[in-house]
Amino acid sequence: MQHNVLILDFGSQYTQLIARRVRELNIFCEIFPFNHFPNDLSSYKAVILSGSPYSVRSDDALHPDLSQIRGKLPLLSVCYGAQYLAHFSGGEVAPSNTREYGRANLSYIKRDELFFEGIPDNSQVWMSHSDTIKKLPTNGIRLASTHDVENAAYRIEGETTYAIQFHPEVYHSTDGKQMLENFLVKIAHVPQNFTPNAFVEEIVTEMKEKIGNDKVVLGLSGGVDSTVAAVLLNRAIGKNLYCIFVNNGLLRKNEFQNVLNQYEGMGLNVKGVDASQRFYDALAGVTEPELKRKAIGNAFIEVFDDEAHKIEDVKWLAQGTIYPDVIESVSVKGPSATIKSHHNVGGLPDFMKLKIVEPLRMLFKDEVRRVGATLGIDSELLGRHPFPGPGLSIRILGDITLEKVRILQEVDAVFIDGLKAAGLYDKVWQAGAILLPVNSVGVMGDERTYEKVVALRAVESTDGMTADWVHLPYDFLMKVSNDIINKVKGVNRVVYDISSKPPATIEWE
């Protein structure tokens, strides 16, 4: 895999965003902890230092070893990085009189500087720090200021080193992407060659060399990640890929057969296994969410292992692990900061003694979709909302019964079909229904009812880390509520969840 840009993480909540913005420029980049990055930097064309929740003035300030970077590679230091260079290189960092957080505007920009080429006067930027640079480091040249922050941006004379106290990666920095492009393309001369087509060609070649003529087994979920991973591997190794799609009885209405039909049309070697009863037995009487997840995970391992053993001489287990899974395994604190393999099915690799192959491990979710489109995967499948691994079990609060599953499947189908019919499905990141352990009094006809309450949930997000509830039209909510109550026996009340994440989660359990 090409390298190009190294991002050193100091624990900022925005580090992933830096990577996403760089990728949007068709430039490949990788995130490593500041204290645990590759020794060989020969393939990297530039380095970016992230922000951090820490202060450079504190006793536990994070100290990167920049001996192989500074002055040798183009370097962009963001927020903490900018303060670090100042504090330890002859400048001065002091507490701000007021916390500098939120929108600000560049009141001064030094012209004829490549970094700010094409950036208009008064450009809006996003600040997030409680310290500020009072004095620039040795050979520092001020490039930009805001009304409150004199040294908002600077460069080091005699080096290709730039530093900014604001966050160009966030949406609120209106010209942030242009600044990143100026630094990476115009100053560091990083090639813009990371495209979906290039990725497909590179990863297919890599998979062919890695796997050879060995057999690979892959657990399909019907979701975007496992599907794209399957199509990529199918292109690389063809008939040696064996896909298993397990019905845990907790999928959406008719989903098992619908997904199998979709896969059949894609030329994949897929075996569907209906193990619903095995999962229901494992969940009998279980109410605690984590215990539900464990029961489902264990049952899946057993079923998947049984099926995999029916295939002779399988050497590899393929997984749809994506880059956020990898990043979340990285800690910036402590010497043991290593990247561990994330398992989409917990414990499966050790249990089965198979080697792991993860063709998507360097891609973000939006990149997976773009690669999927390049591979010719149906847009409806690529546009599917995320769906939890434990399925409807974590959308049924309390114990799991066949009747509860039936009710929720029917409610979910009315809701999702309604979103599609109203042209709202693609405007929502994730939607679903939750069956509450609550009965409410209702009136249907002239009769008193005492039936279930369901909550509808629809959120907008980019990666699931944060999410806002979607302002669905009242007319739509009124219609879907009526449809659910009229069509789904056992439900007499519908509510809509208007909680954002944080403080709530997307799922209820």
Image (tube, rainbow, N blue to C red):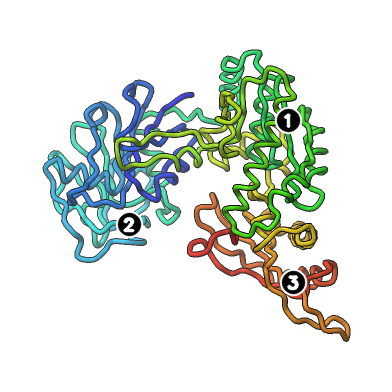
Disc 3 marks a residue whose amino acid type is Lys
Secondary structure beneath dot 2 equals strand
> Going by the picture, which residue comes out furthest to the bottom?
446
Q: Mark 1 to mark 2: distance in Å?
A: 53 Å
Seen from the viewer's position, the closer of residues 195 and 453 is 453
- Give the mark nearer the N terminus: 1 vs 2: 2
> In the image, what residue occupies the spot 29% across and 42% down?
77
Please tell me whether mark 2 or mark 3 is closer to you in this view. 3
Q: Is residue 194 visible?
A: yes
Q: Which residue is mark 3?
A: 452
Tell me the residue that label 2 is attached to.
Answer: 127
- Label 2 and label 3: CA atoms lie apart by 47 Å
| Residue 45: percent from left, percent from top | 36, 27
Crowding at label 3, few (<14), some or many (≥20) Cα neighbours within 10 Å?
many
Return the x and y of residue 98 as percentages of the image width and height: 23, 66
> Which residue is found at the position 75% from the left and 43% from the top?
247
The image quarter containing residue 29 is top left
Which quarter of the figure has residue 75? top left
Q: Residues within 10 Å of mark 1 (few under 14, many from 20)?
A: some
- Which of the labelled discs sits on residue 307, or is there none? 1
Compared with residue 268, is residue 365 higher up or lower down, i.e. above or below?
below
N-terminal of the pair, mark 2 or mark 3, is 2
User: What residue lies at 73% left-to-right and 49% top-to-bottom?
Assistant: 281
Decide if residue 183 is on the left or right side of residue 438: left
